[in-house]
Image (cartoon, rainbow, N blue to C red):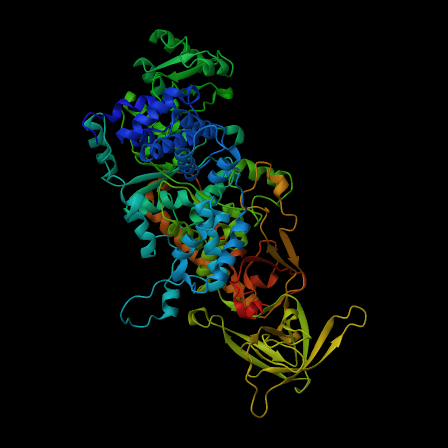
């Protein structure tokens, strides 16, 4: 760096164009690129007046590229700047290509040639990228598995057809094709020999508790969260504030989760819950649940109740439950103190006047006059929007969050909405972890604490969690509900937490998902398929497996007597004996999946066909198809006649299929009234602002022909009993541990029945999918004392929700 270069001299200028503090500081580091950026700003009035942050960042990228390039004329520079401002150049790569073009050309440019070289107007859909990836793999036989992932991404990027595609979309497309082609990526095997692990014991030892695994703990030890300051480590305006803080907290980490009770929490909130509660728990600290109840017009009791219920469902217990409205007295007193210190004033300007001139005519009014007017506000003299208390900050600062923000606006019914409320209430909570949209607010946050000379928590910002292909806005989800696109806030097609719970997603799977994403300042924009893969992995060793048939086809085994009956004891999971066993009947009449039979055989087909043999899961012998019956009108196959291979040397089958026997005395099969299959609610990965036009009309499929083995009802009762016992034990333990929460908060603890519903009955329909029992189900036998004899009764109504599909393999595809 040049000895005469002083980066701080450039900061005020750089921030005026729309750069954040950190970006401005970064742009000022290099003497050469900083000088070029200064020239670009001074030569272009539009830039000097300020532009959108994204455009400002591209101007910075342009200055960096010019610093490394050869001679580029002033007019050529201006042309590239103009193409950035008119949004022709939208990425850093495009800007770099524009500079390269300008190095070897002079104005006037061939615009068509320039656009082609720089990717202007380039557009490609994710599905098209996937097709290019498949073509690349077809022509590169050396790609044999996940070990070639990095080289494949690099190779695909070099294709001219995807030259300007987003690197993230290319990476996602390659990973998607690899998953379809090579299956799930396996973890690297450790070097050397290790003793064989007992998978059953490992699975049984799994807990839903968020701190149960080493991988989750590492999130709090490393990276963004690992680098957070120790308690009391944040700079303070006075040392005695730090000492008082450490005395009050005992040196512990205190965090808070501050949701607004104006809607139901969605999956994005699960990351905030995990970060705040998990970080505090990892450090043996405490986490508040603080309801930000400052907008009573949109708040409802059901939202308060659901928020607490979801926090507990995810496995956390607030140390203390508070409400922002609890602090109204303190907030009023702080507002008076701020005014007395000359750091606030009462303003009567309209919003339009404030926009036209940030320097308010009331800014220099006497302190006594502002105090008197503030008292008038309190006593109801002014109508809404006629008076505001504004903080007297720094109008010359480049950060708009320092332009005399409104702190204390008047609202009807003597209720105040505090824009500075979060800062003050965080002071009571000691530690503030929030998402990156509040980065610009950190400066005013710190200013207010120092102006009042109170303890200043460190605000640390992390990236939000967004799932592609769905909506994360409460306002838009509300529109989906109110306009009838979905059946309520808990419709399993949306991604509210109550909807995910109803669908059957285990809370531990959600915590596992957010923990594997890590925590950093970058937003997590994740495909739904990745979330569903985490759910599959979680269920793989925890969900019992039952025989299930979605579209039954009758099979009569002709060489068995009419009254043939045998019971088979089968494990509920081949690798987890702790899950137990179930007993199922095998009779002369069974049902198989209609798709497991075809009239025309082929060499690569291994299931049933005329003259073909197939194995039956858990049955003592296989069956061979000898004949079939056809509906004379529709031509559809209605029944198969098969022979049990129970004599002589049995034929060895190449495939096994699921089945369910007909046996009325034992209640087999159990008929499922509705099996709900949920497809994506939106057609695109990124629903447009007018999301209604993107609704998938076929997002809900209802199958009314499914049947299962008799083990489902005893299993359901046992799972409900076990889950309620565990929930009751957990809430009792939490109540004892959180003495202060119990003493100071009158919010009732959720009962085991509130934390546990039908959705905890989860199982894998063998070769079908993972399912959960829906709340619409009515099963009288679940109330009987003997769970092992539970059978379907008249009036019962069984509804299953598909949680996630199974990972398909090449054999099944054929």
Q: Residue 378 falls in which quadrant of the image?
A: top left
Q: Is residue 89 above or below residue 573?
A: above
Q: Residue furthest bottom?
A: 648
Q: Nearer the viewer, residue 413 or 27?
A: 27
Q: Position of residue 208 (x, y in %)?
A: 40, 56
In this rendering, position of residue 409 left or right of residue 426: right
Q: Nearer the viewer, residue 128 or 807?
A: 128
Q: Nearer the viewer, residue 742 or 176?
A: 176
In this rendering, position of residue 450 left or right of residue 754: left
Q: Is residue 719 visible?
A: yes
Q: Position of residue 167 (x, y in %)?
A: 44, 46
Q: Position of residue 413 (x, y in %)?
A: 51, 21
Q: Say which quadrant the N terminus sits in.
A: top left
In this rendering, position of residue 414 left or right of residue 40: right
Q: Say which quadrant the C terminus sits in.
A: bottom right
Identified at 29% across, 21% down, the residue is 452
């Amino acid at each position: 760096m040049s000895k005469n270069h002083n980066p701080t001299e450039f900061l005020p200028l750089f921030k005026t164009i729309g750069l954040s503090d950190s970006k401005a500081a970064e742009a000022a580091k290099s003497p050469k690129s900083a000088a070029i950026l200064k020239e670009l700003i001074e030569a272009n009035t539009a830039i000097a007046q300020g532009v959108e942050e994204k455009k400002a960042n591209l101007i910075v990228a342009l200055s960096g590229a010019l610093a490394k390039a050869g001679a580029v004329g002033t007019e050529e520079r201006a042309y590239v700047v103009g193409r950035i401002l008119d949004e022709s150049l939208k990425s850093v790569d495009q800007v770099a290509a524009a500079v390269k073009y300008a190095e070897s050309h002079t104005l006037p440019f061939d615009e068509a040639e320039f656009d082609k070289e720089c990717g202007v107007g380039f557009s490609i859909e994710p599905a098209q990228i996937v097709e290019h990836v498949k073509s690349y793999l077809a022509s590169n036989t050396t790609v044999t598995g996940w070990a070639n992932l990095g080289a494949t991404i690099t190779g695909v990027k070099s294709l001219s057809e995807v030259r300007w595609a987003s690197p993230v979309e290319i990476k996602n497309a390659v990973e998607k094709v690899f998953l379809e082609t090579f299956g799930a990526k396996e973890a690297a095997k450790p070097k050397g020999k290790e003793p064989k692990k007992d998978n059953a014991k490992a699975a049984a030892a799994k807990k839903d508790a968020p701190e149960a695994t080493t991988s989750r703990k590492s999130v709090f030890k490393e990276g963004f969260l690992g680098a957070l300051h120790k308690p009391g480590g944040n700079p303070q305006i006075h040392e005695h504030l730090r000492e008082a803080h450490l005395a009050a907290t005992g040196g512990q980490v205190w965090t808070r989760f501050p949701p607004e009770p104006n809607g139901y929490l969605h999956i994005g909130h699960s990351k905030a819950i995990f970060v705040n509660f998990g970080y505090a728990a990892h450090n043996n600290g405490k986490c508040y649940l603080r309801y930000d109840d400052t907008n009573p017009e949109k708040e409802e009791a059901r939202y308060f109740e659901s928020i607490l219920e979801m926090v507990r469902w995810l496995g956390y217990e607030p140390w203390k439950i508070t409400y922002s409205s609890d602090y109204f007295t303190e907030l009023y007193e702080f507002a008076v103190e701020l005014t007395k210190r000359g750091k606030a004033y009462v303003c009567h300007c309209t919003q339009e006047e404030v926009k036209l001139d940030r320097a308010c005519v009331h800014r220099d009014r006497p302190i006594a006059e502002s105090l008197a007017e503030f008292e008038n506000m309190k006593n109801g003299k002014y109508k809404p929007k006629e008076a505001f208390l504004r903080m007297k900050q720094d109008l010359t600062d480049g950060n708009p969050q320092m332009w005399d923000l409104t702190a204390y606006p008047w609202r009807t019914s003597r209720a105040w909405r505090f824009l500075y409320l979060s800062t003050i209430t965080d002071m009571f909570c000691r530690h503030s972890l929030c998402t990156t949209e509040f980065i610009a607010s950190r400066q005013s946050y710190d200013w207010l604490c120092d102006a009042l000379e109170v303890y200043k928590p460190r605000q640390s910002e992390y990236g939000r969690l967004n799932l592609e292909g769905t909506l994360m806005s409460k306002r838009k989800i509300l529109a989906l509900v109110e306009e009838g696109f979905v059946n309520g806030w808990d419709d399993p097609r949306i991604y509210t937490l109550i909807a995910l719970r109803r669908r059957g997603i285990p809370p531990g799977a959600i915590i596992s998902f957010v923990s594997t994403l890590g925590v950093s300042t970058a937003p997590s924009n994740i495909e739904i398929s990745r979330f569903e893969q985490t759910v599959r992995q979680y269920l793989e060793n925890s969900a019992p497996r039952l025989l299930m048939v979605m579209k039954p086809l009758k099979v009569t085994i002709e060489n068995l007597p009419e009254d043939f009956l045998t019971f088979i004891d089968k494990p509920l999971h081949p690798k987890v004996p702790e899950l137990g066993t179930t007993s199922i009947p095998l009779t002369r009449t069974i049902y198989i999946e209609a798709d497991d039979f075809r009239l025309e055989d082929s060499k690569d087909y291994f299931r049933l066909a005329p003259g073909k043999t197939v194995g039956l899961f858990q049955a003592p012998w296989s069956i061979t198809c000898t004949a079939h019956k056809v509906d004379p009108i529709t031509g559809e196959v209605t029944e198969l006649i098969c022979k049990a291979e129970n004599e002589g040397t049995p034929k060895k089958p190449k495939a096994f299929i699921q089945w369910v026997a007909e046996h009325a005395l034992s209640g087999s099969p159990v008929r499922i009234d509705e099996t709900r299959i949920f497809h994506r609610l939106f057609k695109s990965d990124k629903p447009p602002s007018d999301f209604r036009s993107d609704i998938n009309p076929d997002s809900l499929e209802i199958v009314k022909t499914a049947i299962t083995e008799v083990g489902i009802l005893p299993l359901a009762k046992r799972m409900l009993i076990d889950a309620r016992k565990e929930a009751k034990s957990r809430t009792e333990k939490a109540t004892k541990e959180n003495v202060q929460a119990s003493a100071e908060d009158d919010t009732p603890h959720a009962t085991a029945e509130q934390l546990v519903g039908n959705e905890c009955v989860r199982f894998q329909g063998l070769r079908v999918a993972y399912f959960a029992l829906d709340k619409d189900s009515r099963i009288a036998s679940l109330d009987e004392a003997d769970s092992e004899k539970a059978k379907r009764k008249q009036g019962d109504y069984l509804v299953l929700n598909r949680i996630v599909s199974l990972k398909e393999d090449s054999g099944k595809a054929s």
